[in-house]
Amino acid sequence: MKCYKRIIPLILACMMLAGCGQNVYKKGVESLENKDYAAAQENFQKAVEDKKNVADSYRGLGIAYYEQEKYKDALAAFENAVSAGTKETGTICNMMAVCKMQTENYEDAISYYEKALDHSDCSDDMKQEIQFNVIVCYEKLEDWDNAKAKLEDYVTAYPDDEKAAKEAEFLKTR
C-alpha cells in the first residue's frame, strides 16, 4: 500500500485539473491533499449530489472512504466512478481489489488484481504488492495449489522478499 503515497498525489492533480470551477469538488480535492478524509468524503458526496464532476467526485469519494478503511463504501464509490466514465486504471483496479480482499471476497479480489496487472500504470512496486496479495487471497480460499504456484512465481521474481519466505514456510504445512 506504500505505492499509494506516490499515486494518490498524481490522481489528485488530475482531479484538480478536471475540476476547475467546481467549488465543492475543489474542496474535496483540497481535503484529500490535507488528509482530512471525512471532509473529503462530505465534499465529494455533495459534488455527486450536485452532479458536479460526477466520475471524478466518485473517484475522490472512493479514495476518501478507502483511506478511512471503509472498504465496502470505497468499492461502491469506485464502481460508480467507473460507471460514470472514470478510466479503469491499474491503480483503481488495485484499490478495488484491496476493498474486495478487506471484505473477504477473495475471488473478486483476485479478478481485480489480475485486471490491475494488465494496465500500464501499474508500477513495479504495485505489481509486487499485487502478486503477493494474490497469494494471500488463494490462501484465504484454501486453494493451496494455486497459492503455491503463485508463490513459486513470486519468489522467482522477488527472491529476497522475507514475507515470501514466511509464506513458503506456511505453505509447506498445507
Image (cartoon, rainbow, N blue to C red):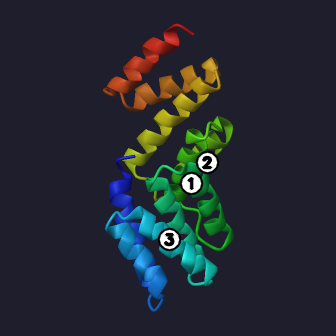
Q: Which residue is drawn at 41% across and 74% down?
A: 29
Q: What element does badge 1 sit on? A: helix
Q: What residue type is labelled 3?
A: Glu
Q: Which comes before the other along the chain, label 3 or label 1?
A: 3
- Residue wearing tag 3: 42
Query: Does 151 appear above or below 173?
Result: below
Which of label 3 and label 1 is nearer to you? 3
Q: Which residue is drawn at 36% across and 51% down?
A: 3
| The C terminus - image quarter | top right
Which of label 3 and label 2 is nearer to you? 3
Q: Position of residue 88 (x, y in %)?
A: 59, 63
Q: Which amino acid does label 2 sit on?
A: Tyr
Q: Position of residue 22 (x, y in %)?
A: 48, 88
Q: Which comes before the other along the chain, label 3 or label 2?
A: 3
- Residue wearing tag 1: 93
Q: How far apart are marks 1 and 2 (CA)?
A: 5 Å
**Number of labelled discs?**
3
Q: Which of 45 and 174 is in front in this view?
A: 45
Q: Position of residue 135 (x, y in %)?
A: 53, 29
Q: What element does badge 2 sit on? A: helix
Marks 3 and 1 close (CB-CB < 8 Å):
no
- Residue wearing tag 2: 112
Q: Nearer the viewer, residue 54 or 138?
A: 54
Q: How far apart are marks 3 and 2 (CA)?
A: 27 Å
Q: How far apart are marks 3 and 1 (CA)?
A: 23 Å
Image quadrant where residue 158 sits: top left
Q: Which amino acid does label 1 sit on?
A: Cys
Image quadrant where residue 106 sits: top right
Query: Does 140 appear above or below 83?
Result: above
Q: Is residue 147 left or right of residue 64?
A: right
